[in-house]
Amino acid sequence: MKAGMLHNSVKDDDARENLTNFVASRPVLLSVAAFLGAGWLWLIGPENDSVLAALQPYAPAVTSLAGSFLAGLIIGRIARRKLKHVLIAGGIVVVVVSLLTRFSVIGPAADQWVQSSVGWVSEHLDKMQSYIAALLPSATVAGSGLYLGFRRKRKPHHAD
């Protein structure tokens, strides 16, 4: 019983250390600093004769980009940790839906729902195109944050 408790304690300590390392990493610190600094500059606004007044027009864009990057970074970090569980749950859902369809439990109703969903999506796709195009820079930055959050840090090799 004590060995199990010790294992959980070591596991909790490792999780805390990993979280601390993640929060103290350069990408997180830089994106938080850019987000807070640009947000402050955007909301408060400097005096007209200060150096920061020249940067104020760029503050909304920097706030949006830094926030998107930070969100992508955090989502990537969570996804990396929970990917195994999500894949198992998704596999179970696919198997259950396949079995229910195979035994005609949800066959006609599911087919009708899919057809109506496809029709709705095709009707609203043109409206979404302009919205997505407006979000493209922010989505690109969020995608790079997602990549950096998802990747696993490699441990350096020590020459012995």
Image: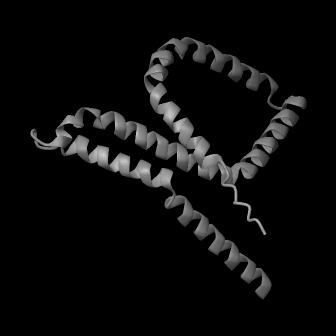
Please say if 13 is above or below 21. Answer: below
Residue nearer the viewer, 9 or 28: 28
Please say if 30 is above or below 139. Answer: below
Horizontal and vertical percent position of residue 108 = 79, 22
What residue occupies the far bottom of the structure in this picture?
A: 2
Residue nearer the viewer, 98 or 6: 6
When asked about the image quadrant of residue 118, the answer is top right
Q: Which of the image's four quarters has the N terminus?
A: bottom right
Please say if 114 is above or below 150. Answer: above
Residue nearer the viewer, 93 or 74: 74
What residue occupies the far front of the structure in this picture?
A: 160
Q: Which of the image's four quarters has the C terminus?
A: bottom right
Give the residue drawn at x 57%, y 47%: 75
What residue occupies the far right of the structure in this picture?
A: 103
Q: Is residue 88 left or right of residue 150?
A: right
Horizontal and vertical percent position of residue 78 = 61, 52
When asked about the image quadrant of residue 87, the answer is top right
Give the residue drawn at x 55%, y 63%: 21
Horizontal and vertical percent position of residue 116 = 65, 17
Horizontal and vertical percent position of residue 142 = 51, 38
